[in-house]
Amino acid sequence: MRNLLCLAVVSFLAVACAADQPAPLTKDEARARTIDGKTDHFDWCAEFDWYGDGVCDEFCLDPDPDCTVDDECFVGGCSGQVCSDQPGVITTCEFLPEYACYQQATCERQTDGQCGFTMTDELAECLAPEEDCANGTVVDGDSEFVDSTDGKQCEVEQTHCVTNDSWSCPQLSPLPPDWCPDGTVVAGSPSYISSADGMECEMPSVHCVTNDSWACPMFSPLPPDYCEDGTLVQGPSSFISATDGMECEIPSVHCLSDDTAACSL
């Protein structure tokens, strides 16, 4: 009789334990059950082996080792636009307007365990897309190249708000069929002028390039060690008059700085 009673007690406890066993849930669901930053009453991290899984789980009842290992974050990139756990991250030196928003932002470890810039109302407002072009089309223009502080150059990307009203721009006549019979018609980079409605007009650029290489300046090749401490990029071509009355297409080559501080524009 005693053995049957013990067996009944053991069976009851087993059923009770099984009833108390938590159902599987995601980390976001566990995080939603936190009180003062910690999960209440039950250690989900121990139950699902979230301790030391490579992700900082700040809601664990006990300290997660992923939150204490290599906890420092570093600002990197040519314009200070990268927040990561690796010091000295190098990027190419093109500059976008939104990069300026990160200059006053805080680079720190986020709730998902990754390094990143903490989003504040000020940062969100700075990064918000411009609404000045609500009635036009935002178009990427050719990059501009400006001098860097280390004697090389920085690439600055340009955008334009092009009007959708063609009548706000000059009306262009088509080129005659016999235009440039002795040369090669080449499309250059478009230019942008003010439109009548306060936006911009995209103006096509067409050139009659000579087929006679002797009618253009002769260029020497770049030395082998040119830009050995930077990044060599090709920019948009320019066009100058040729000696035969047509044009010469002049290549554009730029040495971009790899110094993260030289292009903090």
Image (cartoon, helix red, strand yellow):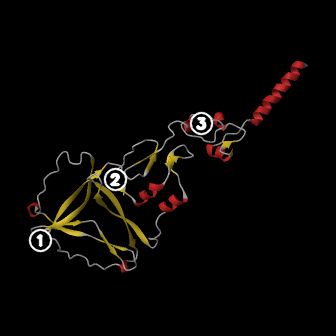
Helix, strand or loop at label 3? It is loop
* Circle 2 residue: 93
Callout 3, which amino acid?
Asp
Q: Residue at x 32, y 57 (%)?
A: 155
Helix, strand or loop at label 1? It is loop
Q: Distance from label 1 to label 3 (Cα)?
A: 75 Å
Residue 228: % across, % down:
24, 45
Q: Is residue 127 left or right of residue 187?
A: right
Q: Residue at x 56, y 45 (%)?
A: 112
Q: Earlier in the sequence, mark 1 or mark 3?
A: 3
Helix, strand or loop at label 2? It is loop
Number of labels in the image equals 3
* Circle 3 residue: 64
Of residues 98 and 182, the one nearer the viewer is 98
Q: Quadrant of residue 229?
A: top left
Callout 2, which amino acid?
Cys
The reply to whether callout 1 and callout 2 are in contact (CB within 8 Å) is no
**Residue mark closest to the camera, 1 vs 2:** 2
Q: Distance from label 1 to label 2 (Cα)?
A: 38 Å
**Residue mark closest to the camera, 1 vs 3:** 3
Residue 184 visible in the shown view: no
Q: Earlier in the sequence, mark 3 or mark 2?
A: 3
Residue 145 visible in the shown view: yes
Q: Which mark is residue 219?
A: none
Q: Residue at x 42, y 52 (%)?
A: 81
Of residues 134 and 105, the one nearer the viewer is 105
How many residues crowd around disc 1 within 10 Å: few (fewer than 14), some, or many (20 or more)?
Answer: few
Residue 125: % across, % down:
51, 62
